[in-house]
Image (tube, helix red, strand yellow):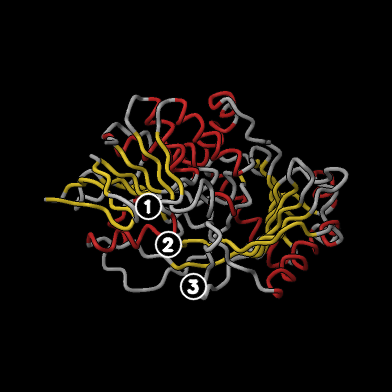
Amino acid sequence: MPEIVIIGAGISGAAAACRLARAGHDVLLLDRYAPAAMASGWTLAGVRCSGRHPAELPLAQAAVTEWQTLHEDLGADLFYRREGNLRLARTPDEVAVIRDMVADQTAAGLELSFIEGKDVQEIAPAVSPSVLAASWCPGDGHADPHASVAAFIEAAVRAGAQTSWGEEVTGLDVEHGRITGVTTTTRSIPCERVILAAGVFADKLLAPLGLSLPYLLRVVTVVRSEPLPERILAPVIGVANADCAGRQEIGGQWRASTGVGPWDGNYDDSTGKPEIRPTLASVRDVIDRFGTVIPAFSSARIQSVWTGIIDTTPDALPVLDTPQAVEGLAVGAGFSGHGFCLGPVTGRILAALATGDPVDHDLAPFRLARFEGWNGRAEALTLHG
């Protein structure tokens, strides 16, 4: 009988499992598919402070600090590189957007600068000369998503955590307002506490308990190229209106995406992992948009393409909470396409919430109760990756 069951083996769930197991708790980490099978594996894996909502910025700053030594803590190469983030302006209107963002974030204490013209190519020669301006955040970076999640899980297992893949949780068991276990497709598992980090499936498990997490499910198409002979771009690239983003991986592959778009709800998991097949139009859109700002991307050979789901909350902020209605339940969900960077910190927060330990961050902006009475649609557009 595990003391704590963690539902969802993305980066937040994996990090929580690691922290709890190291603290001596009996932990079972479950996933209906496999580690990093969804959002944490689909992501561009940016590790950034730039472009963050003010409420989320302290979490991102703490996470970026932790990422710098995380490989030593976990004993594995996460392929983390602190090589900066450029957010590009392609039109005069976008220049104004970037200029305002830099002013707001420098006022909040972030190391960020506004650059124009050839200064952009001085930092990243691969960027097209047609780009007018950019924000430059040298403290941002990127990592390998699958290696990072795997490292947390391996550290958790070394500390005594149990894992189970391909096991879908179908319900949370509650008696007299308290968690007593979880029910899966194959068994019932008694436990004292649950961490729900199930991504796009979180609301399905909350609804029978009278809890609601409103989000709009959107999709992003990602194109990954074959490795180039050399690595010609170090920073992560974004644009002012979030319609594309990308980077060049340590191994030379390009990984680029569109902005968010509508989803018809269809996916195929017959192979044991969820797959949403991108349309030819969306793949062409990635190539055209990212190729406009990074011309070398347009001539690269495609290795793979995929579509990822983003659970966008009304305010584009996640839920990190212990709902009062269900004792023993901690929720981490609704990361709105930018939760990967936060994983080391949100995992630590979820572990503390599950055990009742103090949390070092203000969680008021992330309470589930902020959506009580919400009858609209989650339309917030945010920067992802």
Give the residue pinned by disc 1. 319
Q: Residue at x 70, y 46 (%)?
A: 136
Whether residue 335 is visible here, answered yes or no, is yes
Q: Quadrant of residue 142?
A: top right
Secondary structure type for disc 3: loop
Secondary structure type for disc 2: loop
Marks 1 and 3, the one that precedes in the sequence: 3
Front position among marks 1 and 3: 3
Marks 2 and 1, the one that precedes in the sequence: 2
Give the residue pinned by disc 3. 265
Q: Give the amino acid type for the residue marked by disc 3 in the picture.
A: Gly
State if disc 3 and disc 1 touch (CB < 8 Å): no
Q: x%, y% of residue 313? A: 42, 62
Secondary structure type for disc 1: strand
Give the residue furthest to the left: 176
CA neighbours of label 1 inside 10 A, class few (<14), some (14 to 19), many (20+) = many
Image mark for residue 313: 2
Q: x%, y% of residue 222? A: 67, 60
Whether residue 96 is visible here, answered yes or no, is no
CA neighbours of label 2 inside 10 A, class few (<14), some (14 to 19), many (20+) = many
Q: Residue at x 66, y 64 (%)?
A: 258
Q: x%, y% of residue 355? A: 28, 34
Front position among marks 3 and 2: 3
In screen coordinates, is 72 left or right of 222?
A: left
Of the pair 74 and 121, the residue shown nearer to us: 74
In screen coordinates, is 166 left or right of 325?
A: right
Image mark for residue 210: none
CA neighbours of label 3 inside 10 A, class few (<14), some (14 to 19), many (20+) = few
